[in-house]
Image: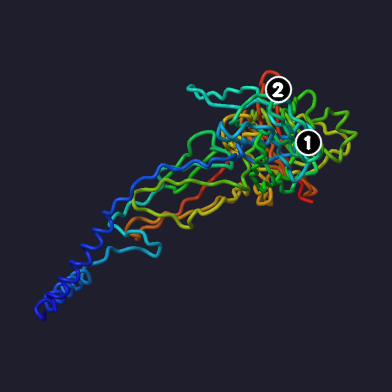
Amino acid sequence: MKKYISAVFTVVLAASLWMGCKKDSPVDEDGLLITTRAECFVASFDMLGSDHLVTNKAAVIDTTAQTINIEVKFGTDLKKIWPRFGLAQDCKLDPKITTWVDFSDLSTPREWTVISGNRQVRKTYKVFVTVGN
Amino acid sequence: MTGKFFRYTTVLAAAVMLASCSDKDYQVPEPKNELQNDAIKRSIGPNMAGLQMEFAYAIALPADKGKLVSAEVEASIAGAPETYIDNRSYYTNGSGDDIGIEVTNPSENKGNVTSVTFNKDTMASTLRYYYVPAAEARGKEVTFKFTGRASNGQTVTYNLGPFRISAMEMKLDIPVSDAGAKYFSIADMTAYNAADAAANADKIDLVYLHRTTPASFKHGLVAPAADAQYLPGVTLPPGVNRNTKMAKVNQLRDQQLSRDQFAVFVDDTDFQELDLSNGSNFALGLDKDYGVWAETADGKYRAYIFVNSVNNGAKSAVLSIKRYTMK
């Protein structure tokens, strides 16, 4: 019986040690995996209104100037827009988009910062909105 | 110690296995040798004043016990005069179609009670009951007591409910046109031309318009108080100046407004929880199957206006509305 208990104890101890020593993957404050990727750019962008896509044509993204120019349809309710970003792999956006965004002040572009997968590179993009016909 | 442990465990496992393997003989259920009944509500969606609520009421007894004599439904709130029991009994054929066979005299309404008397020698029947809530039932709960009687004197009853009658009001197929009835009143659930709008200026909440220039938004609903750029070419009648809040949506095809197959319903709760505090006062680019949530400037009404159809050539549209009174 003692042998039996001893064997079980040894196995459990070994398993605990093995699991305890396993190195955790690095995650950031949002629980997202921190990778080695340094790419940091916006790959795509569009806008949704309460009913549908509100854009007339594809957004123009300048990754050098870090600007996004987009034209919305005439009559778009600019106080209630849900922007959609497509980012380079492993990147994240700051601030997060968790609700409708007010774009009604056309003279003041909204800004978002893209953070690379390794969390070392940050690039702030300005979003310029114009109203089409 | 180990030996005892294994012995007890084995006995316990054997007991469990034995118990789980014990076979229970299936017993064919004994049918009740008496008059029986059952009822279900067949219609779905909000129960609204003026719209039929459909029920199916089944009653049957063994053939040697007699035949069906009568059936009745007592509603806790009297229905509108259109309430009735279909005098046919239905069965579903192999193609899935409901086939009705006349088994009773036409139904009669007396106060809260709708009744039929069987005129065929039948021992089993499924009747359809159509209750049309009266306007005074709006916002209240209604219950139903179904009763069946047989020739042997037996009586059975079945209670259904309560069912809440929605506080909403609804109006279907309101035509609007850029050249004619373009001034829409949520309070009256109708559209006026310019002359009538001037006479009802304090009730005009929206202006329907169709434009391809200067901006090609085609069909739109705009509050009279909206920025002039959203009302190009519109000269508002005197006194028409309300500022209605709105939110445009697409593909929210309420089944009662669209009369389409989509089992989507706008209900009282949607209006109670609707937040248009940041709503716009214009909804442009409307098309068939678009809709607009709206709240009148005085906060008295909230509404969902659905676009049933549009005609670009005639610059017109057909709208349907569900309206909820807030105060």
Q: Residue furthest top?
A: B313
Q: Which residue is mark 1?
A: B80
Chain of the residue under label 2: B
Mark 2–mark 1 Cα distance, whole angstroms, equals: 38 Å
- Circle 2 residues within 10 Å: few <14, some 14–19, many ≥20: some
Confirm whether residue A75 shows in the render: yes
Query: Considering the numbered disc 1 on the image, is that residue within a helix, a strand or a loop?
Result: loop
Q: Quadrant of residue A48?
A: top right
The colour scheme used to paint the residues is: rainbow
Q: Which residue is mark 2?
A: B315
Quarter in which the N terminus of chain B is drawn: bottom left
Query: Considering the numbered disc 2 on the image, is that residue within a helix, a strand or a loop?
Result: loop
Amino acid carrying mark 2 in the image: Lys
Q: Quadrant of residue A44?
A: top left
Residue B117: x, y in percent?
A: 71, 30
Left or right of residue B22, residue B96 in this image: right
